[in-house]
Amino acid sequence: MSDQSYLQQIQSIEGKVHQLVQQYQAGQERLQAAHQEIARLQQVIQEKDAEIKNFQNQDNISKIVQTIAVDTTNSTELKLKINEYLREIDKCIAYLKE
C-alpha cells in the first residue's frame, strides 16, 4: 500500500472518530437536559402534593367548622382561627426540622 492509501485511511478514521465524539457530546447534552427536566418535574410534584395537602386540610377544617358552629359569622370566625392555628403548627414543625 502506498502512503496515499494510508493517509486516506487515517483521514477516514479521524472523520469517524470526530463523528462519534459529536454524537457522544450530543447524547451528553440530551442526558443533562433530561436530568434537568426530571428535577423540574419532581419539584412540580412536590408543589402539587403540598397543594393537595392544603386543600385536604381546608376541607377538613370546613367539615369541623360545619359540625361545631351553627351560625355563619361564628363559622367563618372559627374557620379563620383554625387556619391560623394550623399555620402556626406548620411553622413549628418546619422550625423543628431545621
Image (cartoon, grey):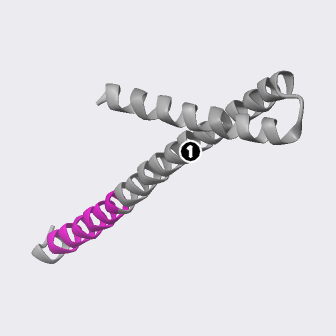
**Which of these two is toward me, 62 or 77?**
77
Magenta portion: prevailing SS class = helix
Task: Write the residue at 35% across / 55% down.
Answer: 28
Q: Quadrant of the C terminus?
A: top left
Tell me where residue 48 sits by quadrant: top right
The amino acid pointed to by label 1 is Glu
**Percent x, y for residue 25?**
32, 61
Q: Residue 42: x and y, percent? A: 51, 42
In the displayed structure, 2 sits above or below 27; it is below
Judge whether residue 60 is colored magenta. Answer: no
- Disc 1: which residue: 47
Image location of residue 47, percent across then percent down:
56, 44
Residue at image x 50%, y 46%?
43
Q: What span is colored magenta in the figure?
A: 6-25
Quarter of the image for residue 54 reads top right
Q: Is 1 displayed left or right of 55 in the figure? A: left
In this rendered view, identify the residue nearer to me: 65 or 45.
Answer: 65
**Disc 1, SS:** helix
Relative placement, left or right, of 23 versus 61 is: left
Nearer the observer, 52 or 31: 52
Q: For mark 1, does the 10 Å Cα neighbourhood hold few (<14), some (14 to 19), or many (20 or more) residues? A: few
What residue is at 72 percent from the left and 40 percent from the top?
77
Q: Is residue 14 magenta?
A: yes
Q: Please, is residue 44 above or below residue 83 in the view?
A: below
Give the number of marks. Answer: 1
Q: Residue 92: x, y in percent?
A: 40, 29
